Structures are given as structure tokens and as C-alpha cells.
Image (cartoon, helix red, strand yellow):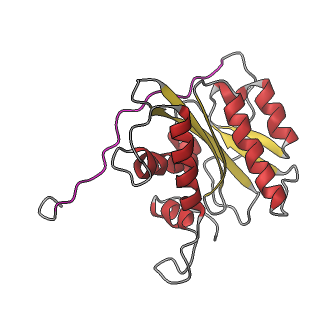
């Protein structure tokens, strides 16, 4: 790699984002690390990550992903870790599927880690009102929410890193992160055409399968 002038992307030390609320009632784990499904709307996974601004302040970005092909259905950014932004991402996901003519019908599983945002009463109500049933993994175990962790890893390495083609300069505000995230999600969702190694498959499916996760067809 060095002889060819290549350099690998290094992931920096993580900031802890999953903080459990010991007093909260936790939904059962309905997934048990099985992310392979046979159709869209069967399983949605959710998680959020942090983005550090040049000021040292953190912005948090939440994602909701359909496990069938690793498609991002909803996302939201916030300067706080209150539950409203993870709820905004899941409402966005439900609204998108409704616009596409495939509304969530109550049997869709919404799976997340055991962070206090996802175990809050208000978030649980939002999940059910959106046509989903909650599923919660354990605290601090990435394997229990591996698909969402994979999407976040791609987001950090493809969009957030300093030499990312999606960046136009330093990230100074939540609005900068929102614009960058919107551009990346738009690109991430887009099909690449019928010619290529994936035969026109949605790129998210290819990326996730490359990580070792088993997903449905795109």
C-alpha cells in the first residue's frame, strides 16, 4: 500500500453513546442477532453516533435502517442526546415507507441497543404509533445491533472523515453535519445502474454483505 501511495482509513477511539437507564422497562430482544429477513418492513434497526465539531462540541446523528437490504429510511441530527432526535428518525422512516405505498403495519420490529433514548416511555410510544414493535439488545454489545453499527461505521469513514469527498470544509455547526449527512444518505441510497459487480444492486446491500452480515436481496 505504501509503495502505491495508499493509506488506510483509521477509526479513532469511540465516545460512549449508549447509556442505559436502569429504571426503564426494557423490551425483549426479538432479533437475537439474526438480521436476515425475507422482505422489507420486517426488521428496522436503529442507532446513533457522534460527530465532533471544530469547536469540540458533539453533534449526534441517528439512523433507522431496513435490514432487508441495509437501506437507510430515516436519520436526524441533534446537539443533545434527548430522545426526540431518535424519534424523529423513526417517524421519518415510517413516513417514507407510507409515501412509497408500503406502510408499516404493526408487525415491523424496531431493534436498537439499550440506550436510554430507546428505552424511554415516549420513544416506546412513538415506535408503536409508527406501526412497529420494540426490540432491545444489551448494553455495550455491538453484536446485538451489528447492522446499525455497520451503517454507522460506513457513515464515519465515508462521510465524516476529514478527507471525505462529502465535506466542503470544517464542521462548525449542526447545520454543517445535517447538510453533509443529507448528501451522503442521498448518495448511499442511489442505485448505481445495471452494469457492475453488483449487477445494479443497491450499494448498501453490497457494503453490508462485505462486512459479513447476511441481508435479503435488494
Q: Is residue 29 visible?
A: no
Q: Residue at x 38, y 45 (%)?
A: 161
User: Which residue is at the front of the view, 162 or 144?
Assistant: 162
What residue sits 76% from the left and 57% below the top? Answer: 42
- Is residue 11 highlighted in magenta? yes
Query: Can residue 78 be found in the magenta stretch?
Result: no
Where is residue 170 shown, x and y percent of the image? 39, 38
> In the shown orientation, is residue 114 left or right of residue 3?
right
Residue most extreme to the top: 23
Q: Residue at x 51, y 39 (%)?
A: 176
In percent of the image, x 50 and y 50: which residue is there?
Answer: 150
What residue range appears in magenta? Answer: 5-21
The x, y position of residue 7, in whole percent, is 23, 54
Which secondary structure dominates the residues rendered in magenta? Answer: loop
Tell me where residue 209 appears, x and y as whole percent: 51, 64
Judge by depth and name the residue closer to the eye, 101 or 114. Answer: 101
Image quarter of the N terminus: bottom left
Indicate the quadrant containing the C terminus: top left, top right, bottom left or bottom right. Answer: bottom right
Q: Looking at the image, which residue sits at the far left?
A: 3
Amino acid at each position: 500500500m505504501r509503495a502505491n501511495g495508499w493509506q488506510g482509513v483509521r477509526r479513532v477511539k469511540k465516545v460512549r453513546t449508549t447509556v442505559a437507564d436502569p429504571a426503564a422497562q426494557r423490551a425483549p430482544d426479538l432479533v437475537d442477532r439474526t438480521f436476515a429477513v425475507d422482505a422489507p418492513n420486517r426488521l428496522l434497526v436503529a442507532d446513533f453516533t457522534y460527530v465532533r465539531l471544530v469547536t469540540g462540541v458533539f453533534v449526534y446523528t441517528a439512523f433507522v435502517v431496513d435490514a432487508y437490504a441495509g437501506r437507510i429510511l430515516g436519520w436526524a441530527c441533534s446537539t443533545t442526546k434527548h430522545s426526540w432526535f431518535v424519534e424523529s428518525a423513526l417517524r421519518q422512516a415510517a413516513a417514507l415507507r407510507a409515501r412509497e405505498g408500503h406502510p408499516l403495519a404493526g408487525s415491523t420490529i424496531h431493534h436498537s441497543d439499550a440506550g436510554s433514548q430507546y428505552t424511554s416511555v415516549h420513544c416506546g410510544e412513538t415506535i408503536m404509533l409508527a406501526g412497529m414493535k420494540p426490540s432491545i439488545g444489551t448494553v455495550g454489545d455491538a453484536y446485538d445491533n451489528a447492522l446499525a453499527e455497520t451503517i454507522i461505521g460506513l457513515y464515519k469513514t465515508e462521510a465524516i472523515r476529514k478527507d471525505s469527498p462529502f465535506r466542503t470544509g470544517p464542521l462548525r455547526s449542526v447545520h454543517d453535519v445535517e447538510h453533509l449527512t443529507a448528501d451522503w444518505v442521498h448518495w448511499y441510497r442511489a442505485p448505481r445502474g445495471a452494469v457492475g459487480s453488483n449487477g445494479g444492486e443497491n450499494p448498501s446491500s453490497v457494503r453490508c454483505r462485505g462486512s459479513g452480515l447476511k441481508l435479503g436481496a435488494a
